[in-house]
Amino acid sequence: MKKAEILVITLIIYSVLAIKPAQAEKGPIDPMDKGAMTLDIGIGLGTHFFGNGYGFGPAFKMAFEKGMWQVGPGVFTLGGEFSVSYFTFKYYSNYKETWINFMFGARSAYHYGWKVPGLDTYAGIPAGIGFCAFTDHYVDPKFHYGYRGYQAVFPYFGIFIGTSYFFNNVVGIYGELGYNSTYADLGVVLKLK
């Protein structure tokens, strides 16, 4: 997870430093339009679709969307997403749980056109399949160790809202909130077309 976090932070810093002030006002008007394609790469707080529901775990998420249908002032998109989240929880000094969730899904969103250069706002729904690798580890007072692990496959559905701001015609930053593969995530968005 640390390599992914470093990559996202590096991309954000590079995108901000590589843009001249004059270019900052040249983001596309309504960045998501019919035929446009974007790629989000970010980090955030993973959700507990599987696990005990305690605490927050770091997550890495990628999402792709393509503008499909112009509807009023906005565009409906279709795409996909992938995320990995890691959780660990220690109940007492002798019991610990760990689980890693891998989630693959489709997503659709409505991107509203505000006619503000570089600004995009959207809301949508994801649906997909998750895979969890779970382990727990117990140490009893007599130094007997207990360890077990198993995997689970589960469906996931959710809802999200987000916004992005493009510094130029290619690079921007985004943020999302909701109950998706993450509760919240931030990162870099690239306009591929």
Image: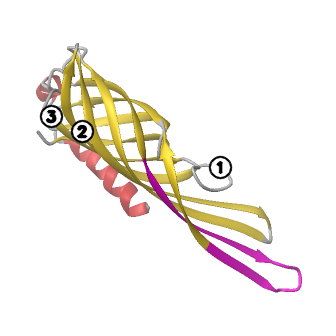
The mark lying in front, picked from 1 and 2, is 1
On screen, residue 33 above or below 6:
above
Dot 2 amino acid type:
Val
Q: Residue at x 35, y 40 (%)?
A: 107
Q: In which quadrant of the rendered view does residue 167 lie?
A: top left
Q: Quadrant of the N terminus?
A: bottom left
Residue 62 visible in image: no
Q: In which quadrant of the rendered view does residue 69 lie?
A: top left
- Residue 13 image offset from top left, x and y in percent: 28, 45
Mark-to-mark CA distance, 1 and 3: 37 Å
Q: Which residue is mark 3?
A: 36
Q: Which residue is mark 2?
A: 16
Q: Which residues are magenta?
A: 128-149
Residue 148 visible in image: yes
Q: Main secondary structure of the magenta part?
A: strand
Mark 3 or mark 2, earlier in chain = 2
Q: Which residue is mark 1?
A: 55
6 or 111, which is in the foreground? 111
Q: Is residue 70 magenta?
A: no
Mark 1 or mark 2, earlier in chain = 2
Dot 3 amino acid type:
Ala
Q: Residues within 10 Å of mark 3 (few under 14, many from 20)?
A: some
